[in-house]
Image (tube, rainbow, N blue to C red):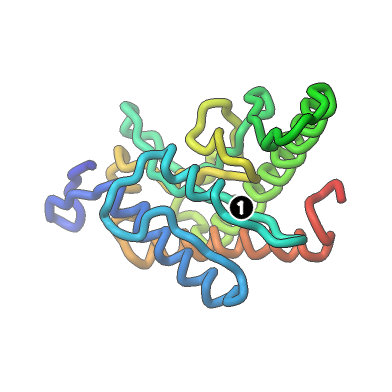
Amino acid sequence: MMTHKIKGKNVTVKEKDVNLAVGKMLYSRLKSAYPDKKILMTRNTDKFLSLAERTEIANGVKLGEKEAVLYVSVHVNSSLDKKASGYEVWYLSPGYRRTVLEKTGDVDKNLFNVMNSMMEEEYTTESILIAKFIMDGISAQVGNLSTSRGVKAEEWFVVKNSNMPAVLIEVGFLSNEKEAALLADNSYLQKMSLGIYNGLSAFVTHFERSRGFTNH
């Protein structure tokens, strides 16, 4: 939460409000474009859910044959450096190994480890591709209103326990007065949500044309 002077008035901009606003806008666009697909929000009210609870919701989605699930997490940045600004998209580095398959029955341990590693690499590849599509989508909508900080990889970010391709989007810095004013502007958030949507749409088109993830 940050308070800045915006258009001569002290305005408090809350991260949770920005996240929820962008999430709802994105949800609406996706529901309209893909009425036959399951679009879930882990939070659609002011109620707080822990990161573990949100990941559990995503991991609990039941998939049919030839279906896949993507996890998109929207956040707002902050920094002690008040000049820091811009948006960025993160994916999970393959340096962090997740257990992405459930071991059932008497499965050979070595085979399980190989399969788990292959699935993890596939998720990483898809996450990178989704991140790049989203970055391009945001850049096209936002233009010179904000700057791209690029696609980044980390081992600690909040979707590390998700059993699926996943990305985290930082839409801007609340600690930057100019950017906080943008994040308090509904029209700017619409641009941001449209950029994210366009990126996801581009990935879905790629996914369906290739009839599966990139190495299929």
Where is residue 108 drawn, in percent x and y? 82, 26
Can see residue 177? yes
Which secondary structure, mark 1? loop
Residue 17 relative to residue 165: left or right:
left
**At x 57% / y 54%, what residue is drawn?**
61
Where is residue 95 drawn, in percent x and y? 66, 23
Q: Which residue is mark 1?
A: 70
> Picture quarter containing residue 160?
top right
Give the amino acid at mark 1.
Leu
Where is residue 47 drawn, in percent x and y? 27, 52
Residue 142 relative to residue 187: left or right:
right
- Please determine whether, in this image, residue 48 is positioned above or below residue 202: above
> Picture quarter containing residue 36?
bottom right
Badge 1: residue crowd in 10 Å (few <14, some 14–19, many ≥20):
some
Where is residue 153 drawn, in percent x and y? 61, 32
**At x 29% / y 54%, what residue is drawn?**
17
